[in-house]
Image (cartoon, rainbow, N blue to C red):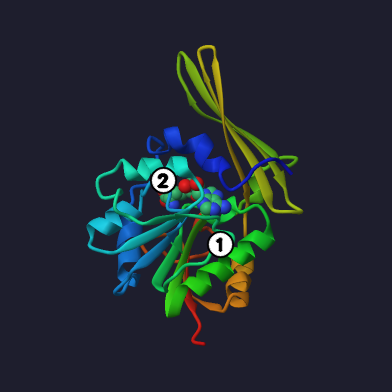
Amino acid sequence: MSSWDAETYGSRWSEIYDGLPWPGPDQAVDFLAKLAGNGPVLELAIGTGRIAVPLVERGIEVHGIDSSDEMTEKLREKEGGAGIPVTKADISAFKVEQSYSLAFLVLNTVYALQTQEAQLSCFASAAAALEPGGHFVVEAFMPDPTRFRRNSWTQVHDIGLDHVLIEADKHDPSTQQILEQHIHLNQGKVELFPAFLRYVWPSEMDLMARLAGMSLVERFGGWLGEPFNARSGNQVSVYRRDAV
Ligand SMILES: C[S@@+](CC[C@H](N)C(=O)[O-])C[C@H]1O[C@@H](n2cnc3c(N)ncnc32)[C@H](O)[C@@H]1O
């Protein structure tokens, strides 16, 4: 498909990542803290610590996995981020030394894995990292193929006297892959921020979890515990590792 690999996201986005208008972490942190038990907890694709750092501030021991040195460097620069143990690994296939009460993979990052096989293997790795009864929480947007016309989509996200920010996407419904380019034009300068992804339907995600030895506990429409239904734009799925 492309030369996208596990390190591409970090190398292309790390410089601007913390300046992007992400939702505040408080709701996610409240939700995850309730499931943390005695910890420690494991964040898959920990990034710059948007969620991990406030969790640590609540007294929860957090460990992380990420494939990007650039993202981990940004985490290290933060107060509270320097002490978080981060293992450089691909979340599609990893092994950890200990077991965790909670593992989580948020902000659509399960979709950063480009194939069903890689996603399935990620679920298996996450299940193996959990103690029996431990939870795996996945947050991701709900796929909406209706936004594509002839399998493509463009949108102007921002515009000013000297700049424009355009998103251009290609969709392949047969593979559930979306290739996104976020194009920043600023005076004479052009910068490209790619995000290649494979979305997953909730039913498919539940099957991946079952194959990995986990069961769906509950699915919400957001971090506040909103009901999940046909109008939900987001899903927060809570899986529990089955007893062995
Ligand atoms: C959208 S950021 C999310 C970071 C953080 N979880 C947050 O909520 O802000 C995606 C992160 O996933 C990491 N990542 C992408 N693909 C990965 C892979 N295959 N294995 C490990 N990390 C990966 C990137 O390096 C980046 O830090």
Disc 1 to disc 2, C-alpha distance: 36 Å
The quadrant where residue 54 appears:
bottom left
| Amino acid tagged 1 | Ala
Percent position of residue 232, x then y: 51, 58
- In the image, residue 188 above or below residue 179: above
The residue wearing badge 2 is 72
Would you place residue 71 above or below residue 58 in this image? above
Check residue 213 in the rendering and tell me which mark sits there, or answer none.
Answer: none
Q: Where is residue 29, by image quadrant? A: bottom left
Q: Residue furthest front?
A: 97
Query: For mark 2, does the 10 Å Cα neighbourhood hold few (<14), some (14 to 19), or many (20 or more) residues?
Result: many
Residue bearing mark 1: 230
How many residues crowd around disc 1 within 10 Å: few (fewer than 14), some, or many (20 or more)? few
Residue at 23 percent of width and 60 percent of height? 58
Query: SS of the residue at dot 1?
Result: loop
What amino acid does circle 2 point to?
Thr
Residue drawn at 33 percent across, 44 percent down: 76
Q: Is residue 143 above or below residue 8?
A: below
**x and y, in percent, of residue 226 in the image:** 40, 63
Question: Is the distance from the Cβ of mark 1 to the nearest ligand 1 atom less than 8 Å?
Answer: no
The percent coordinates of residue 67 (x first, y second) are: 51, 49
> Does mark 2 have its CB less than 8 Å from ligand 1?
yes
Nearer to me, 221 or 73:
73
